[in-house]
Amino acid sequence: MSKFEPRMFIPGPTEVFPEILETLSRPVISHRGPEIQAITEEIFGGLKYLFQTQNECWFALSAATGLMEGSIRNLVRKKVLCTVCGAFSDRQAKVAEKCGKAVDTLEVEFGQHVTPDAVHRALEEGDYDVVTVVHSETSTGILNPIAEIAEIVRAQDDVLLVVDCVSSLAGAPVLVDEWGADVVFAGTQKCMALPPGLCLFTVSPRAMERAESIPNRGHYFDFLNYRKMAERNQSPATTSIPLVYALQAQLRRIREETLEQRWQRHETMATLARERLSPHFPLFPDPEHMTPTETVFLNSKGLDVEELLDRVRARGRIFGNGYGPLKGKTFRIGHMGDIQPHHLDEFLKIFEEELASLG
């Protein structure tokens, strides 16, 4: 790994290390020529490893929010059940409503996880054809039990599961084939440790069959068009060649580290952050269901979080305030991407010193 000293300990975007940044300066090539086709073919294979799937895998020039919309437009015929446990799962519900779909929400208290039993009860009571779940809810630090939820969903006739893995892909186990999930997506700016701008996603055969039956699934995220262009190792629209270079390089680095070691590194950093700071602040999410990619603490001391942020920033590091309605009530430490435990240790020393200076 690089000797680069990271500055950002927020839950995304994460630091992009110099060796990846260097790939962005390579000369731009045609987005339809043989060179990009070879790179794209390698990327598609790398994404299968990343998602742990044999399903079709693609990338789009988009934030992950684009796939929130794309999955709804490609898959929903009647009604969608959106599980809501934080700000980003709530966003998925709002996106579905703006697509003109019938939407029910299954809401749990922020800081708690979505239970399989609650999903089971909702599916028995409603006539749904899609369920959405956020794996790692970045606003609260919760990691939802996707394997158990997926088992419930698969037991229903003709119900598809869409999983947002924005802050878990490449930082926590994402096991698409083992789960049996139908659409799984993530951006590149969190555990992938790449610049923002690409969305990575995988689509099951069942989901592709559903998309074929949807007449108004849109254009930009039309799954059938992604399949058609992938047959030529291309993407449908003009993409960002520098970002594709960076994705190719980072997928190689992840294979070299191995997913298993990468997941373990994130667990190690999560343990470090929690052991160091939980004597000062209680954990906000349910301790039995915390994501390994960030830690969210409850501001039990009534601190001015912005003042603490400013003090830490003045020493060359930043962490995250609470998100949305949790701003000021919580704060978030991101430990994801390519940062190493010793980087996090240095940040925590600075944090603890500035916390002490506030008395």
Image (spheres, rainbow, N blue to C red):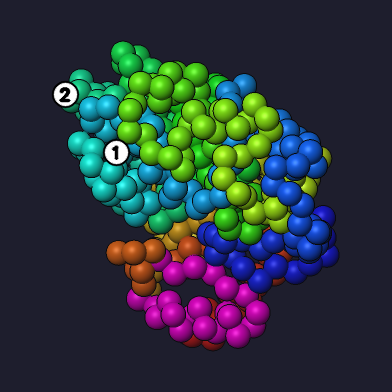
Q: Where is residue 9 in the image (x, y as percent from the top left)?
A: 59, 65
In the foreground, 6 or 80: 80
Residues packed near mark 2 inside 10 Å, few (<14), some (14 to 19) or many (20 plus)? few
Tags 1 and 2 in contact by the CB under 8 Å rule? no
Residue 65 in view? yes
Q: Position of residue 231 (x, y in %)?
A: 64, 26
State the SS at label 1: strand
Type of amino acid under label 1: Cys
Residue 121 in view? no
Residues packed near mark 1 inside 10 Å, few (<14), some (14 to 19) or many (20 plus)? many
Q: Where is residue 297 in the image (x, y as percent from the top left)?
A: 44, 62
Q: How many marks?
A: 2
Q: Check disc 1 and report the residue beneath it.
A: 82
Q: In which quarter of the image is residue 96?
A: top left
Residue at x 53%, y 59% (from the top left corner): 11
Residue at x 51%, y 39% (from the top left corner): 185
Give the left or right position of residue 129, taking residue 200 as reference: left
Residue 337 lies within the magenta run: no
Residue at x 52%, y 51% (from the top left corner): 62
Magenta-highlighted residues? 302-322
* Marked residue nearer the N-terminal end (1 or 2): 1
Q: Quadrant of residue 240?
A: bottom right
Residue at x 71%, y 56% (from the top left corner): 242
In the foreground, 87 or 112: 87
Instruction: Identify the image quadrant of the N terminus.
Output: bottom right
Q: Check disc 2 and report the residue beneath it.
A: 125
